[in-house]
Amino acid sequence: MSASPQNHRSILQSIAHRAMLERGLLPDFSSAALAELERLQRSAVTDSTSAAIHDRRSLLWASMDNDDSRDLDQLTFAEAMPAGRIKIIVAIADVDSFVKDGSALDKHARHNTTSVYTAAEIFPMLPEQISTDITSLNLNQDRLAILVEMAVDERGELEDSKIYRAWVRNHAKLAYNSVAAWLDRKGAMPEEMAGVPGLAENLQLQDQAAHRLKKLRHFNGALSLETIEAKLVFDGDQIYALESDEKNCAKQIIEDFMIAANGVTARFLSASKFPSIRRVVRTPKRWERIVAIAADNHYKLPAGPDSKALDEFLVRQKAADPLRFPDLSLAVIKLLGAGEYVAEPPGGDSQGHFGLAVKDYAHSTAPNRRYPDLLTQRLLKAALAGKPSPYSQDKLTELAAHCSAAEDAANKVERQVEKSAAALLLESRLGEQFDALVTGASAKGTWVRLFSVPVEGKVVQGFEGLDVGERVRVQLIDTNVERGFIDFKKINAAKT
């Protein structure tokens, strides 16, 4: 299939809508949900003046997200304390006050369970009027939030924590890339930061706290993984390129704070004798292949899964070959397996998150974008109010399984559109050869990711004997935009 330069976006939008329906997801909101949205007003919050809701609007709150993000789920703040400790506070948008359990809006969110981000169109879990306005922690707006407060010592140990409700106000809408450039002394201070006295110092304190949290996690065995995400760039409605979107220190601040906050929420619910939905990454099923990859790089891993030993190998490899480290990370991630949601009964023994080396972990920090976070928020608010759990253990078990399945479907939609976009980009390059990394090998097929362009495709000829983590040279032999197929044949071993 060949597409004219003017219609790439509309082609991908059509593919995205079809993929949503084929995967059992809803691309559009029902008339009942839209009618409910029309009736929804801020006055719908009935307990906004409750004495249990604190006023924290004067703190130097700021949001950090992608340049084009409009659904702002979190604000962050830090405060220096005696004996070298740092207090971290994460504010999470109070979505439950507007999206009630069992409402038409909730039913749509429960069905899809997540916002689906495709190259041509975003399918939000909640209407944009809610996720980017009513509940979003927007600049210079008073908003209700759930606050997770944590005191961290000089080693990164969590000394104490608490959760409560409060009013907050975002004083600066910051973007990852410009903040990271400033923190790394590679760019000027962002204007948004410079306009708020004291905010620059607060961001530096947040960066210091994040380094402490990260250092302790890795001491405990959290994995040092670094992948390259592909971002589609349009010139009007024509695909211009696929660019690499890499991690930076500003993204790391938010990641470290959210991991810590998610641990606090999980433990809070457990201490409150409440059930919870945990995010779990089980012990790798293909550990033997990870061991083999390490051996190929002259490193011996233990026969049984050991996250701390694996991280030591990853750190060594990053230092030895930083250029190819994202490719190694990708191979390890594929072999670790996907995360899933499980319902944890009060006093249960969580399986934990292998990659983060944490035992207690519940998604709670993105309730505008993920349904498990909204469920966790409802549980937290009930516990704070001294009310019984709004969900039984059986209901949470059912919801956890549904969220895992729907997340998998959403990921497949995103990959489908990403592959269709890549097929559009590569369809004029049939016959070219590329160096690549094997990212998947099973009875369903063998896949590779190209080094020069962040694109993944299937090896349909010469795949016999290939396994995850191997480097190969492949030739592009076919593309199919509608189906998102990018087909290669193996030529010979890639040059190293």
Image: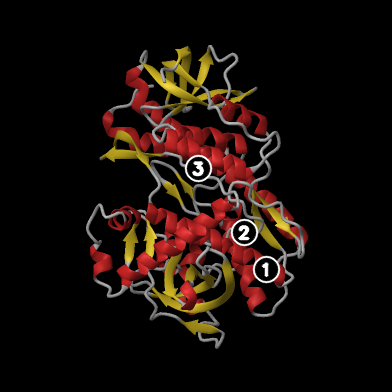
Whether the residues at callouts 1 and 2 have beta carbons within 8 Å, the answer is yes
Instruction: Specify the amino acid type for callout 2.
Output: Ala
Q: In the image, what residue occupies the spot 65% across and 70% down?
A: 268
**Of residues 354 and 382, the one drawn nearer to the viewer in this rendering:** 354
Q: Which mark is residue 225?
A: 3
Q: Measuring from the top left, give residue 116's x and y in whole percent.
A: 49, 47
Helix, strand or loop at disc 3? loop
Residue 433 can be seen, yes or no: yes
Relative to residue 431, is residue 285 drawn left or right?
right
Tell me the distance, in whole angstroms, between the alpha carbons under discs 1 and 3.
29 Å
Q: Measuring from the top left, give residue 360's x and y in whole percent.
A: 65, 59
Sequence order check, earlier mark of 1 and 3: 3
* Label 3 Cα neighbours within 10 Å, binned few <14 / some 14-19 / many ≥20: some
Q: Mark 2 highlights which residue?
A: 362
Disc number lying in front (2 or 3): 3
Q: Which mark is residue 269?
A: 1
Q: In the image, what residue occupies the spot 52% across and 69% down?
A: 153
Up the image or down, 230 lies above or below 347; here it is above
Q: Measuring from the top left, give residue 134's x and y in whole percent.
A: 43, 69
Sequence order check, earlier mark of 1 and 2: 1
**Of residues 287 and 428, the one drawn nearer to the viewer in this rendering:** 287
Helix, strand or loop at disc 2? loop
Instruction: Specify the amino acid type for callout 1.
Output: Leu
